[in-house]
Image (cartoon, helix red, strand yellow):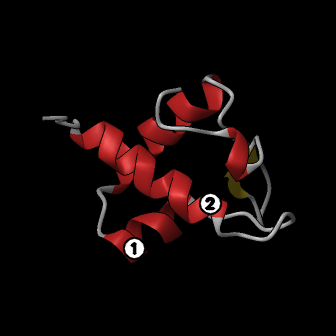
Amino acid sequence: MLALTKKTSYGLIAMAYLAKLEDSQVASAREISRIFGVPMSLLMNVLKELAAAGYVESVRGAHGGYRLARRPEEVNLAD
């Protein structure tokens, strides 16, 4: 049986949500946290780790947020 940590689960939630966005769209950690009921501070740490690993990009600015750094079909759970 495969057991996932909370951080892994939150990362998968965020990645799945970001995968559904249009190419030019971004989502804030606050938005993802609100929609899925994920603790904001933990989600921000997870997104920071995903960015460092090259899975998501952070976009700065007033309309900033996160988006996938790769096309969704290029990412798999084994990675």
Residue, far front: 1
Q: Secondary structure at mark 1?
A: helix
- Identify residue for label 1: 34
Q: In front of the other: label 1 or label 2?
A: 2
Residue found 42% across the figure and 57% down from its top: 13
Kind of residue indicated by mark 2: Leu
72 and 32: which is toward the camera: 72
Q: Position of residue 23 (x, y in %)?
A: 84, 63
Q: Residues within 10 Å of mark 2 (few under 14, many from 20)?
A: many
70 lies above or below 34: above
51 and 60: which is toward the camera: 51
- Identify residue for label 2: 18
42 lies above or below 3: below
Which of the two discs, 1 and 2, labels the residue nearer the N terminus? Answer: 2
61 and 3: which is toward the camera: 3
Side (left or right) of 44 relative to 57: left
Residue found 54% across the figure and 52% down from its top: 15
Q: Position of residue 34 (x, y in %)?
A: 39, 73
